[in-house]
Each structure stands twice: as C-alpha cells, then as structure tokens.
Image (cartoon, grey):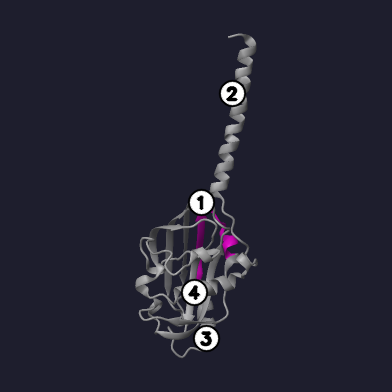
C-alpha cells in the first residue's frame, strides 16, 4: 500500500473516531435527561393545581381492589385512565413502604409523579370543616423530612424539589365502597397537599423512575406520626 493510500485510510479512521463519541453522547443525553415542567407553568393548558385535583378525583373514586395505588406489580397501573384522549399519565405512589413495578404507556404523554402527598377529607374525618381539612393537610406536609426523584439515573436536586409543593383548594369527590384510606362512601370535600412534578411528553423508550419521601409528624393532630414511601418504576413508553 502506497503512502497516499495509508494517509487516506488514517484520515477516514480519524473522522470516525471523532463522530462516534459525538453520536453516543447525543443518544445518552436524549435518553437520560427528561425535562420537568416548571411548577408555575401551565402544563398541557392546566395549572399544576388543576392536574393534581384531577389526579385525586380519579384515584379517590376507584375502590381499593382496582386502585393503581394498591397495585403491587404495575399490572393495573393505567386503570381508569383514557390515555387515547389525554395529554398526561398519572403515575401512582404506594400508600407506604417500598414497591417495584413495571408499567406500559403510549408515547407522547407527560407524566405526573406524586413524590410524597396527602389528602384530607370529611370522608376520612367526619364533620371536619374545609378550614380544618386545609390545616390537617398542610400540617402533614410541613413535616416532610426527605424528598428524592431520579429519572434514568439523573437526580433532581433536593432544593429544586422543594419548589414543587402544591396545596390545593378544596374539591369534591364521591368515595366508592371499599375506598382508599378507609374513607366513608359517598360525596366528600377534599384538600390535597404534597410534592408533585410533571414531565414533558415522553418519547418511546424505557424510563427508570425512582421517587421517595418521608415525614415525621408527632403532634396529636397529625394524620400519621411517621410515613415513608419508596417507588421504583420501570416505565415502558411505546
């Protein structure tokens, strides 16, 4: 092989050595970094508070045996959600403890992630006034001691997660028989509080989502003196 041919081959190899790392890095960034929409934004034309109220209106209307919050494997993670006519998917946290689930959803949806949350209702506290429900919910989340969220290995800073607390106005639900939180069946006034994030619409791929939180609330009017939830979810977006 003559000298000019060797130089040509080396030039081609050098070009490929420069291109391949750039391609790999672009792929990694595209698949590992998921944008979280700002808490003061209007994701999919609704406020964070509106999305959170809609999330709870759905979850509190589903009896325990069918409720995604009680699902231990992810088999019914989409129960009750019409994703062919929605811009957002409601991911659910377990009601305490550690869980590992696999869930499949269509691409193109944003995802609401409830990191640590609470609801207070007169279905759970008969006779409570709206003002009392606000105080109970606020008091619970005032005592959060830890927050954590990572998506595909990219962790959201604790200081940033603190910005995503949302306390709702009161809203109405109808609890079913065998309702979540042992609430009495029938119409109820509810207030929600907690830390929620909403992502950009997700493209096809596999998203490893881990979120967890804990609280210690030892006052006599606390819903629970201690609470911790850890959720490890493999979200398959097709």
Q: Mark 3 points at which residue?
A: 132
Does dot 1 land on a helix, a strand or a loop? loop
Tell me where the magenta segment starts and ends, as one range: 144-162
Residue occupying image coordinates x 44% and y 77% = 61
Where residue 211 sits in the image (x, y, percent)?
Answer: 48, 60
Q: Mark 4 points at which residue?
A: 56
Q: In which quarter of the image is residue 99?
A: bottom left
Badge nearest the viewer, 4 or 1: 1
Q: Which of 60 and 86 is in front in this view?
A: 86
The reply to whether the magenta stretch includes residue 95 is: no
Q: Name the residue under label 2.
A: 13
Badge nearest the viewer, 1 or 3: 1
Badge nearest the viewer, 3 or 4: 4
Q: Label 4 vs label 1: CA separation? A: 27 Å
Q: Mark 1 points at which residue?
A: 204
Please tell me which of labels 1 and 3 falls first in the chain: 3
Please tell me which of labels 4 and 2 falls first in the chain: 2
Please tell me which of labels 3 and 4 falls first in the chain: 4
Q: Label 2 vs label 3: CA separation? A: 71 Å
Q: Label 4 vs label 2: CA separation? A: 57 Å
* Label 2 crowd (10 A; few <14 / some 14-19 / many >=20): few
């Amino acid at each position: 092989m003559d000298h000019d041919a060797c130089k040509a081959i080396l030039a081609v190899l050098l070009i490929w050595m420069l291109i391949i790392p750039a391609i790999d890095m672009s792929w990694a960034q595209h698949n590992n970094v998921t944008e979280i929409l700002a808490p003061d934004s209007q994701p999919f034309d609704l406020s964070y508070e509106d999305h959170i109220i809609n999330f709870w209106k759905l979850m509190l209307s589903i009896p325990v045996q069918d409720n995604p919050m009680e699902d231990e494997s992810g088999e019914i993670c989409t129960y009750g959600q019409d994703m062919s006519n929605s811009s957002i998917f409601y991911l659910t946290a377990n009601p305490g403890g550690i869980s590992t689930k696999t869930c499949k959803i269509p691409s193109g949806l944003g995802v609401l992630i409830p990191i640590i949350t609470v609801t207070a209702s007169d279905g759970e506290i008969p006779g409570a006034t709206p003002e009392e429900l606000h105080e109970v919910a606020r008091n619970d989340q005032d005592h959060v001691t830890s927050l954590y969220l990572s998506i595909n290995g990219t962790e959201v800073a604790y200081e940033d997660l603190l910005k995503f607390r949302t306390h709702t106005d009161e809203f109405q639900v109808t609890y079913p028989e065998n309702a979540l939180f042992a609430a009495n069946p029938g119409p109820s006034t509810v207030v929600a509080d907690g830390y929620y994030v909403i992502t950009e619409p997700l493209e096809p791929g596999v998203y490893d989502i881990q979120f967890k939180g804990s609280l210690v609330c030892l006052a006599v009017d606390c819903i629970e003196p201690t609470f911790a939830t850890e959720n490890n979810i493999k979200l398959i977006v097709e």
